[in-house]
Amino acid sequence: MVGLVLVLSGLTALALGLMRGYRSARAALLPLLADGEPTRSLIEASRPVYARHRVRASARSVACAVLWLAVAMYGLFLATVGAGTLR
């Protein structure tokens, strides 16, 4: 019974982590690919790289994607431990 619960919760965490990680990784690329408003782009080009809004938003989304993928890997761990106890 415990093994079945571990497998199901692990598969749920895997699916949720992969789905949210993909969304966050896709959101990380959008600010960098869009041209944006020309005047605003010129103003942001004069700022240092770490102070630009697009770079900060992209870095935040990458960090979220990595954390969600860590949740997915933990789900894989739970599923393998649960499968081991089912035997």
Image (cartoon, grey):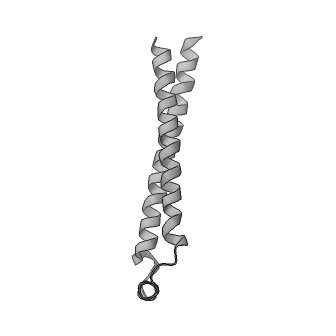
Residue 74 appears in the rendering = no
Above or below: residue 8 compared with residue 43: above
Q: Position of residue 59 (x, y in %)?
A: 46, 64
Number of callouts in the render?
0
Furthest-front residue in view?
A: 37
Q: Position of residue 72 (x, y in %)?
A: 51, 39
Above or below: residue 25 compared with residue 84: below
Between 86 and 42, the one lying in front of the other is 42
Above or below: residue 21 compared with residue 13: below
Above or below: residue 87 compared with residue 29: above
Between 41 and 83, the one lying in front of the other is 41
Which residue is located at x 51 percent, y 44 percent? 19
Which residue is located at x 41 percent, y 88 percent? 43
Residue 22 appears in the rendering = yes
Furthest-right residue in view?
A: 87
Which residue is located at x 46 percent, y 48 percent? 67
Instruction: Give the side of residue 18 with respect to residue 54, left or right.
Output: right
Q: Position of residue 37 (x, y in %)?
A: 44, 82
Which residue is located at x 44 percent, y 72 percent? 54
Q: Position of residue 68 (x, y in %)?
A: 47, 46
**Image quadrant for the C terminus?**
top right
